[in-house]
Image (tube, grey):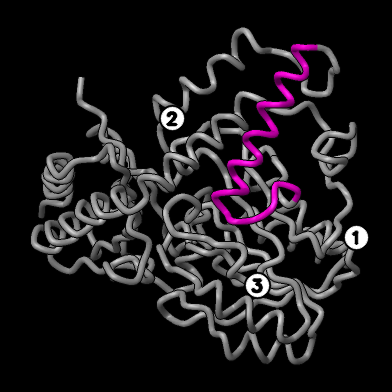
């Protein structure tokens, strides 16, 4: 049986052993409902509030501005619906390269004629056109601008400071999906002019099914999920205590080891880039992902030249025990391809594969992947 090589860490990461250890008491002995007033309930409630304080501390904000969710998708939907229904926002601005957790709810509400949606221009590398954003804000000042901090396919990084200052200067609201950057890039909410921020635990070696939403105290949103009074009446539903505890621990570890992890992972990415350029003539890199200095250090999106086996490339890599993600600029059959690469007009005959790394990967694994690619794509 082939050894599995996991180069899909932008999709999800493994659970860190220390995170699991932190979670275990709340999966076994401390199983109370945080809304119960007895001893077991109080222990659960205390664990949730301690986790909230930790997340707030790591973001340099107040615990009262941190709300736990089931993940980034729920956090994004809460912001979009909250701005529409609580703040009276009718114009929404995003980019065509956003995650579907932002694009799909906006498109759904636009079809219902509940809001007006505008897409800001991006260039051939996927960089947001800030001049176009300014023009749109000049026309519709009180808009919600939702732009991700780090693109999950291309590795492009948005300047949160610059965008936040632009949006606030026009009287708008700024939301950023930071799912790919939380724990990887520094985020200081006292320094940034940002209203809403989304994160998800499983992207930084925490558990799946838990995330958080930052809501600046200047903004009051009504709940997206109605039910009980949990999360200070912001989100109905019994808290995922073990998940919340795990998220906070994973975030704490990610921040403590951020520079160490970044240096190691960037070394893997740099080595991978050098090896693949040498091994496969004609490869290029989508978006900013090939720029080692100015892209997310864990993502590289490779565009392979035309080859008869391109359509089977992901399947062939999977057969070799290599886990990666793909995207094609075509939208035929059941493979709808990548909306991101389609927007960038990546030629349909090229195969596009996202490789994403973590501290658990090695250069030896890179060597094995390169050998597999040479075997699959041999003439």
Residue 61 inside the magenta-drawn segment: yes
Nearer the N terminus, badge 1 or badge 3? Answer: 1
Which residue is at the front of the view, 254 or 154?
Answer: 254
The answer to whether residue 23 is left or right of residue 140 is: left
The stretch in magenta equals 39-64
Which residue is at the front of the view, 308 or 374?
Answer: 374
Disc 1 designates what residue?
85
Disc 3 designates what residue?
193
Which residue is at the front of the view, 320 or 49?
Answer: 49
Disc 2 designates what residue?
15
The residue sitting at 55% across, 80% down in the picture is: 162
Measuring from the top left, give residue 77's x and y in whole percent.
Answer: 74, 52
Q: In the orientation shown, which residue stands out farthest toward the top? A: 29
Give the CA distance from mark 1 to mark 2: 37 Å
Q: Residues within 10 Å of mark 1 (few under 14, many from 20)?
A: some
The answer to whether residue 227 is left or right of residue 108 is: right
CB atoms of marks 1 and 2 within 8 Å: no
The answer to whether residue 119 is left or right of residue 129 is: right
Give the CA distance from mark 2 to mark 3: 32 Å
Give the CA distance from mark 1 to mark 3: 22 Å
CB atoms of marks 1 and 3 within 8 Å: no
Q: Secondary structure at mark 1?
A: helix
The residue sitting at 59% across, 56% down in the picture is: 60
Q: Above or below — where is 12 with respect to 187?
A: above
The residue sitting at 17% across, 45% down in the picture is: 366
Nearer the N terminus, badge 2 or badge 3? Answer: 2
Measuring from the top left, give residue 358's x and y in whole percent.
Answer: 32, 44
Measuring from the top left, give residue 196's x and y in whole percent.
Answer: 70, 60
Q: Above or below — where is 41 with respect to 208?
A: above
Residue 188 inside the magenta-drawn segment: no
Q: Main secondary structure of the magenta part?
A: helix
Nearer the N terminus, badge 1 or badge 2? Answer: 2
């Amino acid at each position: 049986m082939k050894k599995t090589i996991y180069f899909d860490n932008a999709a999800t990461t493994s659970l860190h052993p220390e995170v699991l250890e932190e979670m275990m008491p709340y999966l076994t002995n401390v199983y109370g409902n945080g809304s119960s007033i007895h001893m077991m309930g109080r222990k659960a409630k205390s664990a949730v509030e301690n986790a909230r304080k930790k997340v707030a501390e790591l973001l340099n904000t107040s615990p009262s501005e941190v709300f736990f969710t089931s993940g980034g998708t729920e956090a994004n939907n809460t912001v979009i619906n909250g701005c529409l229904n609580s703040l009276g926002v009718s114009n929404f601005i995003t980019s065509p390269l956003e995650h579907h957790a932002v694009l799909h709810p906006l498109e759904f509400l636009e079809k219902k004629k509940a809001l007006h949606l505008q897409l800001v221009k991006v260039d051939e590398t996927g960089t947001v056109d800030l001049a176009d954003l300014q023009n749109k804000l000049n026309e519709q000042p009180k808009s919600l601008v939702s732009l991700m901090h780090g693109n999950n396919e291309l590795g492009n990084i948005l300047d949160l400071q610059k965008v936040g200052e632009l949006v606030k200067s026009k009287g708008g609201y700024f939301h950023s999906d930071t799912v790919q950057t939380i724990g990887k890039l520094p985020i200081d909410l006292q320094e940034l002019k940002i209203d809403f921020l989304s994160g998800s635990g499983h992207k930084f070696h925490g558990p799946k099914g838990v995330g958080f939403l930052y809501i600046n105290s200047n903004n009051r949103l009504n709940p997206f999920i109605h039910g009980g009074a949990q999360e200070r009446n912001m989100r109905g539903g019994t808290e995922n205590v073990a998940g919340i505890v795990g998220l906070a621990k994973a975030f704490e570890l990610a921040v403590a080891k951020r520079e160490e992890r970044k240096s190691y992972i960037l070394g893997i990415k740099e080595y991978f880039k050098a090896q693949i350029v040498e091994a496969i003539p004609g490869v290029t890199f989508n978006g900013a992902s090939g720029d080692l200095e100015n892209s997310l250090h864990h993502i590289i999106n490779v565009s392979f030249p035309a080859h008869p086996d391109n359509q089977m490339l992901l399947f062939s890599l999977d057969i070799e025990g290599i886990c990666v993600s793909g995207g094609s600029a075509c939208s035929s059959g059941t493979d709808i391809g990548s909306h991101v690469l389609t927007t960038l007009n990546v030629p349909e005959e090229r195969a596009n594969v996202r490789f994403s790394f973590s501290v658990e990967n090695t250069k030896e694994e890179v060597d094995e992947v390169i050998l597999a690619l040479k075997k699959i794509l041999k003439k």
